Amino acid sequence: MDKIALILVIIGALNWGLIGLFGFDLVATLFGGQNALLSRIVYALVGAAGLYSITFLMGNRVRQSK
């Protein structure tokens, strides 16, 4: 779960970097615009991953090794 969250956070960060530097929204371009269902799903997943990633800041997380 941690790796998936990290990947989604990186995607979100890269997308925001593109928006900030070039005014280009890669997610919207790939999935049919900002209001397209797929774009909104990606945005929601990135947001959820960001919220989940807040737990990385907590030192009390229990790590499970596999």
Image: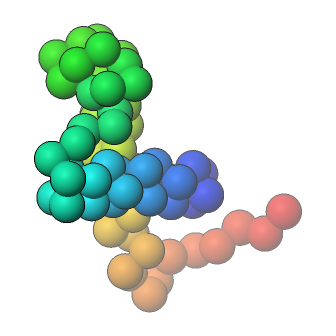
> Residue 2 vs residue 30: left or right?
right
Above or below residue 60? Residue 30 is above
Q: Nearer the viewer, residue 33 or 65?
A: 33
* Residue, far front: 22
Above or below residue 45? Residue 15 is below
Q: Quadrant of residue 47?
A: top left
Q: Give the total number of marks visible in the rendering.
A: 0
Above or below residue 47? Residue 42 is above
* Residue, far bottom: 59
> Residue 55 vs residue 61: left or right?
left
* Residue, far right: 66
| x and y percentages locating residue 62 in the rendered image | 58, 74
Q: Nearer the viewer, residue 9 or 62?
A: 9
Above or below residue 46? Residue 35 is above
| x and y percentages locating residue 13 in the rendered image | 33, 59
Residue at x 18%, y 24% (from the top left corner): 34
Q: Quadrant of residue 3?
A: bottom right
Q: Nearer the viewer, residue 8 or 65?
A: 8
Q: Quadrant of residue 24?
A: top left
| x and y percentages locating residue 23 in the rendered image | 15, 47
